[in-house]
Image (cartoon, rainbow, N blue to C red):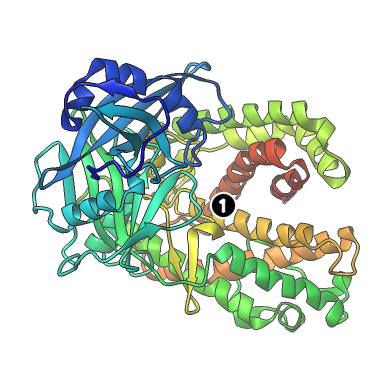
Amino acid sequence: MPDKIIKTIPQAAFEFEGVWEDLLENKDFIKVFLSEVLEDYIIRQRWYGGKASKLKYIELSEYFRIQQHGEVYFGLLLEIDFVEAFYHHYFLPIAFVTDVDFAKSDRILPIKIQGQKGYIIDAINLEAFRKLVFERILGAAPFDRTKVQYHRSESFKDVVYESSRFMGLEQSNTSIIYNEQYVLKFFRRIFADKNPDYEMSRFLTEIKDFHNTPAYQGSLNIIDSDEVNVTIALMQKLVPNEGDAWDYMLKELHGVFLNLSAKHIAIDTLPTVDMFERLQINEVRPEIIDWVGLNVLVKIRQLAIRTAEMHIVLGSEFEDTAFTPNHFNGDYEVWLKNRLLYQFQNRLNTIENRMHKLDGMALDLAKEFLEKKNLIRKRITNFDWTKLKGERIRVHGDYHLGQILVTDGDFFILDFEGEPESTIRDRKVKQPPLKDVAGLFRSFHYAIYATIFNNPESYNRSQEELFKAAEILYSYFTSVFLGTYTEEIQNANLNIGYNQERIFILKYCLLEKAVYEIGYELNSRPQWALIPLKGISNILNH
């Protein structure tokens, strides 16, 4: 923590008695700090998730010291209350700096402590703070019983701090790269429980030795005033990579659609396949191989193997009840239906209110959605747990191409936090593994249509022809994936049900995912609403 004024600070500063280490005990400071100054700062942050709501006020839920060798920072848990009668919790670490040139864009409050002028800033901007957290995790005791708990894995040792930097573009969290070898993710939105990303990372790599997700290295948790273990930060190995699978797939798909003209392919003559059929690559018709190329299908197969391996590991625990497989039951059915019916009604209202923003096929599909609303509702309520023999396990929960890294022709699976709209409790509910498969299938569908939307002048075909080609391509992607995934799962004796059950669950999860997607698209980019609406139409008409 700097203790020397380098230049005169021009802004008017709030003055407080006492020392920095006791500042959080000062009620006058708390009152000033939680004022509009902090509100203005927070609503400008990329990690703030309440931008669509009206902030009412901010409370300090609690605070804790992050310290070492007399160097002290404070971690704050802030409760942000909204006019719409709900609240979020956020983590904000703070530091006091006296250098007028420091963190100009991240200052929260100008203050004067014991005559010394400076600023309260987000401590993550300070290398000294980042180094301290790294060293506290590295030096963690095996069993920490204090309020602020640092933990490290057996593999994180014999390391010396060298450097730290921000990972780059951030959204809901802030990630720091250390020594170009490790990533520490500070969770900004905080829940009163262990974060699923922390739980899943530890389970998969430290307990079960799954190699295709970044290895768990350590964490920072606190025990809050209700004796709940709250995850603040997660450290993992940095995986060298060539970007995520979404960007990779867009690049590959652009080539696939260019082939339509380059190879003079007649779309109407292409052989079709049912999207729930199971195919091995050697069973894919030569006309499709000629059009799509072998490489993309090989990558789809590899992704199916890694997904299956993840699920096999997640279904292999028989002691830790947080991870032991469960069968379907009445409680799960009630939870699922209530959740989906609420979401469906919300999306129904959104479509009715946004119809005027749609045209062409998107408008036609929206009308079909409204005409078939009772059929969709019936599909949701048709879930009958007594007919299902498969198992439920902990799943990724928000599985799509953007959560997967490409590295040396292989795939690493990231970010096990779960669906952003879900509560922390809902994210930990055991689900059919096919829910993740459905999430990835929806991502395939998106990538195919995004390629068409992003390159309107490139393919010398009508939109109608391109959409027809899109659906053929999508069905081969899903079939090749299912052929490999199902074989891997069955060889490992993970019970995902008999064939008709698998198709029922997959359809159900695809419907759920597409209904979920409609809300985002209609609010953000209405023309893209065609993609989830087409996905729903496919399921209803299958």
Image quarter of residue 261: bottom right
Q: Is residue 29 above or below residue 476?
A: above
* Residue located farthest toward the front when viewing the structure as drawn: 8
- Frontmost residue, 212 versus 37: 37
Residue at (61, 56) in percent of width and height: 443
Residue 389 in picture, x, y percent from top left? 42, 49
Residue at (20, 27) in percent of width and height: 114
Q: How many marks?
A: 1
Residue 273 in picture, x, y percent from top left? 72, 67
Residue 383 in picture, x, y percent from top left? 54, 38
Residue at (56, 25) in percent of width and height: 53
- Which residue has dot 1 on it? 506
**Quadrant of the frame with the N terminus:** top left
Determine whether, in the image, residue 404 is placed left or right of residue 460: left
Determine whether, in the image, residue 478 is placed left or right of residue 55: right
- Frontmost residue, 167 versus 36: 36
- Frontmost residue, 467 versus 141: 141
Name the secondary structure under disc 1.
Answer: helix
Image quarter of residue 146: top left
Q: Is residue 106 visible?
A: yes
Q: Is residue 483 above or below residue 186?
A: below
- Frontmost residue, 373 versus 165: 165
Local crowd size for mark 1, using a 10 Å CA cut-off: few (<14), some (14–19), many (≥20): many
Q: Is residue 225 visible?
A: no
Residue 298 in picture, x, y percent from top left? 57, 78
Q: Is residue 467 above or below residue 55?
A: below
Q: Amino acid at mark 1?
A: Leu
Determine whether, in the image, residue 358 is placed left or right of residue 34: right
